[in-house]
Image: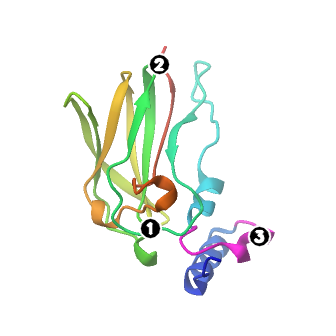
Amino acid sequence: MRAYDERQKRWAIQREKMKGLALNDNMANWPAGSEEAAHYEDEPEQTDVGAGNNIIKIFEIGNLEQVYNGGTPPTFILDKPYHVTELWTYHWNDGRGAPAGTLALKTNDGQNFGPWQVRLHNEVYWVADINRTIPPGEYTVIDSDPSTLSQNASTGGQGMSWMFGYPAQ
């Protein structure tokens, strides 16, 4: 059975109250390190960006389980070109978050995209506003502070990361 971190739970509930959002009935049962639940409520599921394009989640490495620092660089594959709008990483760091840094993408053949300066979301999420088309290929997310990048056994030690955008026209 997982241990629950009361301090983290109280912090998450207080943050939600400050944002004026309705609380879920099951919020009291959040396991330690499950700050992602607030992110999942906040993140765009699908947003019209004009010209018939809808923002979708292109990839996700994450879950609602307890997290630890020291994630390895997340990797993913794009099967076609995407216009990427945002790249997110999660830096729980025992509830302290981490100062904003940079995120970049690197292909398996060494081509670099970025780095992009991030903005903080809820003090623990790094969000890079990318707004460019990324070609198909195998990618690694380069995080400027991997020591605070959240991970756990269910991610295979990879840092938690999400990417949003839409298929390129």
Residue furthest to the top in view is 169
Q: CA distance from mark 3 to mark 2?
A: 38 Å
Whether residue 26 is in magenta: the answer is: yes
Q: Vertically, is 161 above or below 123? A: above
The picture places residue 169, in percent across and down from the top left corner, at 49, 13
Q: Are marks 1 and 3 in contact (CB under 8 Å)?
A: no
Report the residue at 57% width, 56% height from top.
63
Report the residue at 34% width, 52% height from top.
118
Q: Nearer the viewer, residue 5 or 163?
A: 5
The picture places residue 54, in percent across and down from the top left corner, at 61, 28
* Neighbours of disc 3 within 10 Å: few (<14), some (14-19), many (20+): few
Q: Vertically, is 41 above or below 87? A: below
Res. 168 mark: 2
At label 1, the amino acid type is: Glu
Query: Closer to the camera: disc 1 or disc 3?
Result: 3
* Neighbours of disc 1 within 10 Å: few (<14), some (14-19), many (20+): some
Q: CA distance from mark 2 to mark 1?
A: 31 Å
Res. 26 mark: 3
Q: Quadrant of residue 21?
A: bottom right
